[in-house]
Image (tube, coloured by chain):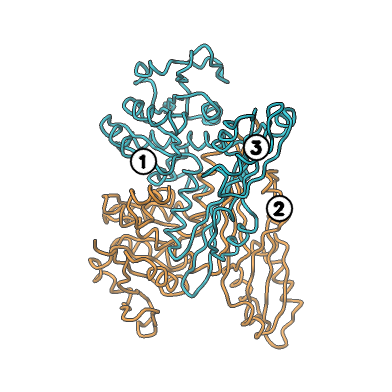
Chain colours: A cyan, B orange
Amino acid sequence: MQNIRVGIAGYGNLGRGVELALSQCPDMELIGIFTRRPPETIQPAGKGIKVIPISEAETMKDEIDVMILCGGSATDLPQQGPQLAKLFNTIDSFDTHAKIPEYFDIMDQTSRKAGRISIISVGWDPGLFSVHRMMSEAILPNGKSYTFWGKGVSQGHSDAIRRIKGVKNAKQYTIPIEEAVNKVRIGANPDLTTREKHLRDCYVVAEEGADLAAIEREIKTMPNYFAEYETRVNFISEEEFKRDHSAMPHGGFVIHSGITGNNNKNIIEFSLKLDSNPEFTASVLAAYARAAWRMYKEGQTGAKTVFDVPPAYLSPKSGAELRQTLL
Amino acid sequence: MQNIRVGIAGYGNLGRGVELALSQCPDMELIGIFTRRPPETIQPAGKGIKVIPISEAETMKDEIDVMILCGGSATDLPQQGPQLAKLFNTIDSFDTHAKIPEYFDIMDQTSRKAGRISIISVGWDPGLFSVHRMMSEAILPNGKSYTFWGKGVSQGHSDAIRRIKGVKNAKQYTIPIEEAVNKVRIGANPDLTTREKHLRDCYVVAEEGADLAAIEREIKTMPNYFAEYETRVNFISEEEFKRDHSAMPHGGFVIHSGITGNNNKNIIEFSLKLDSNPEFTASVLAAYARAAWRMYKEGQTGAKTVFDVPPAYLSPKSGAELRQTLL
């Protein structure tokens, strides 16, 4: 059987992760990396991988079975998504929760018109966590779901700190508050405020002579990002920052507690502990790219989400093999 | 929209659990309970529920959308499965792992010929645990999965003890060994023997004057059931048994640890903590009954497993609603 031919659009942390993930999938083949940057500035991890200006994507229309979009949700995907969905089956990790319905609609129209399929919002949240929230609620409708994130780096919050005057570098860790997690784990179904669920731990490298008290105040009072949370600010040196805060760990858990029949409590928990958030997200994208190709070959078109994908489609194994070895 | 009309075949712990689960599903309606016993000996939990001899199931062919089979895997399902799959869309919890491929084939032929759908081996293991083993392996192919069961009652092992001469009653708890679990949770990917993974804790009520040492020896040396495990035997009184060992808790976890890209470790864990094993299993069956009906209405026929069911089909909510609230 011919390998699934994959393209990567965007070569940041996530795109590099996809390249590495594909190297673990013997049924998939990376055809090329598409970029807005000058192609010669890109150094793929693998030898002989083509780097192609994204403006020339159309010329590769018949050589790519699935394009994995690795741009950001704020500005890249809203523009690149519909553009590339005209030409390719696509997978993306669009994660601006509030705008998902709108993004779904435009991707759905575009893919349907092109006779292609696009699976949006793939990753772990949205993505695997969503599948768990959904399945848990369907199985135990008389119950409640909680999602906790961390310990892990929030890119958005780190960026927000870096935009403050006097800040040279910063990293923000989201940390679930253990007391809240424990209450949820025993099925107490507590009502938890934002402040009770997570704390925000910030590591900041300040510029020389900067007003540290002012920076700390500005972080702690920043609306939507920090004001609603218990926030800790730690000033550290550039060396400490490089030594202790270069990795991109993340994780979290979805806990659903529900009552069956005669007042019996049942708890479903799904958790992730990731050394590398982008590499793991990339691995999820690669598996769903496999699913997209199968669904497309079956004649399905339009936008889909993780909710629409039968688990078997993520695996290179046959149905009989899966039933025999994993059921 | 018309409710999904459901039948229950077999009214033991699982059948009773399904009745209770359906009462939490506003889009589903219990039409009748089918039994081999004299119908007048069955007392459904709900008022006005019809109890029908299973031999008359055919007369209800057009009144039931999905039949949930609640018999056991050893003798009931191999016989009732194919019989009822000729007449109805079916869901069952067939769990004799080694015989799944064979059972799948006969259910597939039968359902396909009848133009119906049958989802086999639904529950939590096989079932939800299978989905996790499968998805984890697809996402992190360079990794290893471990399944631990318990703490929970094993019906089969409890039965095996009860068959020993001099035993009046018995309950066996399977308990995961913490040291092994902890090794797996940190991603050490250990090689574990059967003995290192679980211990078997037995609570036995002996008949008056029975030879306790002989019973203990017979339990601990029973091949396949106990000989391969660390086994503890506790003799207790009938009162203690009734007071402390009447519930049917269970649970367990699937832990997959896999390496991405630059030697980064990522751990996926799914766990269940169930006060009532049969009620939870029944809730899973009810949700998959909903999925079976949708797949049947789409024109799908033949046998399916949890691997073939898109998560969205388990929920009564629309795609738009799911995307807006749970993605």
Q: Is residue A274 visible?
A: no
Tell which subunit mark 3 falls on.
Answer: A
Question: Which is more foreground, mark 1 or mark 2?
Answer: 1
Position of residue A115 measured from the top left corner of the image (x, y, whole percent): 28, 31
In front here: B145 or A217?
A: A217
Q: Residues within 10 Å of mark 1 (few under 14, many from 20)?
A: many
Alpha carbon distance from label 1 to label 3: 46 Å
Classify mark 3: helix, strand or loop: helix
Residue contact between numbered discs 1 and 3, judged by CB atoms under 8 Å? no
Position of residue B182 measured from the top left corner of the image (x, y, whole percent): 70, 52
Tell which subunit mark 1 falls on.
Answer: A
Q: Residues within 10 Å of mark 2 (few under 14, many from 20)?
A: some
Tell which subunit mark 2 falls on.
Answer: B
Query: Residue at point 65% right, 86% down?
Result: B239
Q: Amino acid at mark 1?
A: Lys
Q: What residue is pinned by disc 1?
A: A304
Q: Is residue B7 visible?
A: yes
Position of residue B234 measured from the top left corner of the image (x, y, whole percent): 72, 75
Considering only order in the chain, which callout, 3 or 1, is on the residue closer to the N terminus? 3
In front here: B147 or B101?
A: B147
Identify the disc placed on residue B180.
2
Query: Residue at point 62% right, 39% down?
Result: A172
Question: Which is more foreground, mark 3 or mark 2?
Answer: 3
Q: What residue is pinned by disc 3?
A: A214
Q: Residues within 10 Å of mark 3 (few under 14, many from 20)?
A: few
Classify mark 1: helix, strand or loop: strand
Image position of A257 with respect to A323: above or below: below
